[in-house]
Amino acid sequence: MKATAEVLRLPLRDPFRIARHEDALLATTVIVEVEHAGFIGRGEAFPVAYYGETAATVEAVLPLLVGSLEAIGSPPEDRAASLAWLDDAAGLMDVALGGHGGAKCAIDIALHDICGQQLGLPLHRLLEVPGDVPPTDFSIGIDEPAAVADRARRAARFPALKIKVGSPNDLSTLEAVRAVYDGPLRVDANTGWQPDMALELLPELQRLGVELIEQPFRAHDLAALGWLQERSLLPIVADESAVDITDLDRLAGVVAGVNVKLAKCGGVGPALRMMRRARELGLRVMLGCMEETSVGIRAAVAISALAEWVDLDGCLLLAEDPFTGLELGADCRWRQPELPGLGLRRRA
């Protein structure tokens, strides 16, 4: 098995700032190609420094992760056996190295691509996740209220908008958005609120038709998250507090839901297991993303039928997606390619 990595720095369509002040103008992502058993699979690692990853760490750990798969053999020529083989690969990577969900995600997606190609099955048919692809919302970063409202107006066809918050202008921003958009709003503070601020905002959020509050406080402050959920009619959804499946048990009974992202938890298989475990614990599920290309988004779309809320708009935030094959319908539902594997092509 051999893997190569290509770091892409892609301009964003609009500035996209969140409360953690990450880069608002460029998305840095890593496209990984894995060559195995006569096939070449493609995956994506979106490194987030908050989770301890950079493009450099992805490149550094790829040889270790690939090396951990030396004894795994070729993927079976049977769908069910292939899924078990993919689960085994994810487990071997976890044994070899803790964390590094983005790097593991890239290899996991690439191996799913390989299995789909070998069996002649598009990714969603390989996985056979029941249900229809739900529509995605659209995310808008922190900016002056008038700028956010202008972007909301342009995104009015989406069935819900996710508004990034965590600035002194949160309330005026939401008021400005509500003046031009009448659908559900989801607010995401990316750990940027304090408890007294959140409590003061709660009645205003309800008045403005906010549907949920995502990660208002610091990732490890579960007591504060639970305190707010007890006082809120709106569901609190953990994101930075819900990195992988090991976080779920301690979040049950604390918040109403979790945001599962392939780039956090390690790929398609780990995300599926995380979503199913969340349901078992009574947690509602959002399926989210980073500012990924359609490689990462296409992989997530294949399992999106299991999510209550879908936030898979990363490639729409880019000025230009380097890949083709994944199309957004007029109903804001992704149309999955019917070619084997991911079914994507590099743009000429």
Image: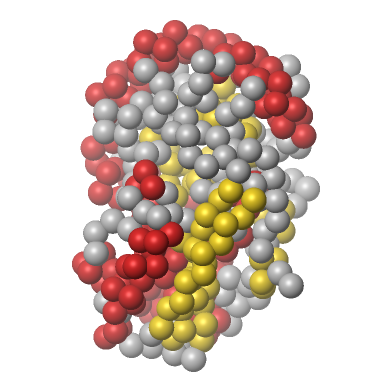
Image location (x, y in percent) of residue 129: 51, 61
The answer to whether 139 is drawn above or below residue 348 in the figure is: above
Where is residue 285 shown, x and y percent of the image?
A: 44, 42
Instruction: Please identify the quarter of the rendering in which residue 283 is found.
Output: top left
Quadrant in the picture for residue 253: top left
Residue 83 position in % (x across, y down): 40, 73
Question: In the picture, which quadrant includes the C terminus?
Answer: bottom right
**Which residue is found at the position 64% from the left and 22% from the top?**
144
Residue 59 makes an appearance in the image: yes
In the image, what residue occupies the spot 44% across and 34% down? 20
Above or below, comparing residue 340 to residue 267 in the picture: below
Q: Is residue 292 above or below residue 332?
A: below
Q: Nearer the viewer, residue 148 or 235?
A: 148
Please tell me which residue lies in front, 125 or 316. 316
- Spot occupied by residue 26 in the image (x, y as percentages of width and height): 58, 48
At x 47% / y 30%, what residue is drawn?
A: 19
Outermost residue to the left = 95
